[in-house]
Image: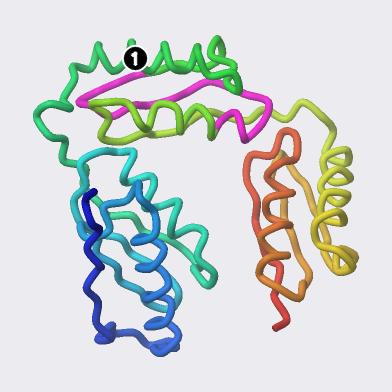
Amino acid sequence: MRQRRPVAWSDSDEGTGDMQGDIQLKQRVMEALSWDPAVEAAEVGVQVRDGVVTLTGHLGSHAAKYAAEEAVRGVAGVKAIAVEIDVRLPGECRRTDADIARAASNILAWTSMVPADRIHVMVEDGSVSLTGTVDWNYQRMAAQRAVAGLYGVVSVTNAIVVQPSVQPQDVKDSIQRAIERQATDDAAHVAVEVKDGVVRLRGSLRTWAEREAALEAAWAGPGVVAVENDIRVNL
């Protein structure tokens, strides 16, 4: 079995914010990358400044790039992620645009969570663009995940639009109830605003886990196209 090499790091990051906090965050990010078997952690560079994580390097597939982004997204303390990773396909993984387009259409048709008849695929130089409309954000993300792992794909642009099919008040009520289920007694401290499919969360919670639970609850709402999470964590 191939052994994973640890990611080298140093504490020489420059920044005007909390340098010690950035150093600790960098360590957590690299541990998350090293822990995920889908990520070639030794090929990924990590920089942190004021809580913003920048990933650099070269990977052999878009799926590995996507896995690196998802691994970092789950690390506590990350405020934003800049992904500057290049995808360099090995020769045996290269495919024509026509082959990629056919494979993408087929895998969308075979993915039960995706309304494939409402999604359009365009491929140029290995870059896949997805357009169309869906009812839920999870359908939009399922389509992206489905094509991300195909041979020959170097990038995915997800331009699928979530079209609200319910009233804003119904969305607000369903999100509020979901937060109440997941954020225990602090749910009353979270205010929910909905306009044109954009949800804004305000207020305060006691833990980052509750804040993330509120964010997930908001994204699960019908017709949600974006979430602005302004919830503070009172540690």
- From this view, report whether residue 106 is shown above or below residue 15: above
> Which residue shows up at 60% across the image and 28% down it?
139
Q: Amino acid at mark 1?
A: Ala
Question: Residue 30 colored magenta?
Answer: no
Left or right side of 61 for 33: right
Q: For the view shown, which residue lies furthest in the front direction?
A: 1
Left or right side of 162 for 182: right
> Which residue shows up at 75% across the image and 44% down it?
195
**Could you say where residue 3 lies in the image, as x and y percent from the top left?**
23, 57
Span shown in magenta: 122-140
Left or right side of 231 for 193: right
Tally of marks: 1
**Could you say where residue 58 lies in the image, as x and y percent from the top left?**
18, 51
- Residue in the foreground of this view, choosing between 166 and 209: 209
- From this view, report whether residue 182 is shown above or below residue 15: above
Q: Which residue is mark 1?
A: 103
- From this view, report whether residue 143 is shown above or below residue 50: above
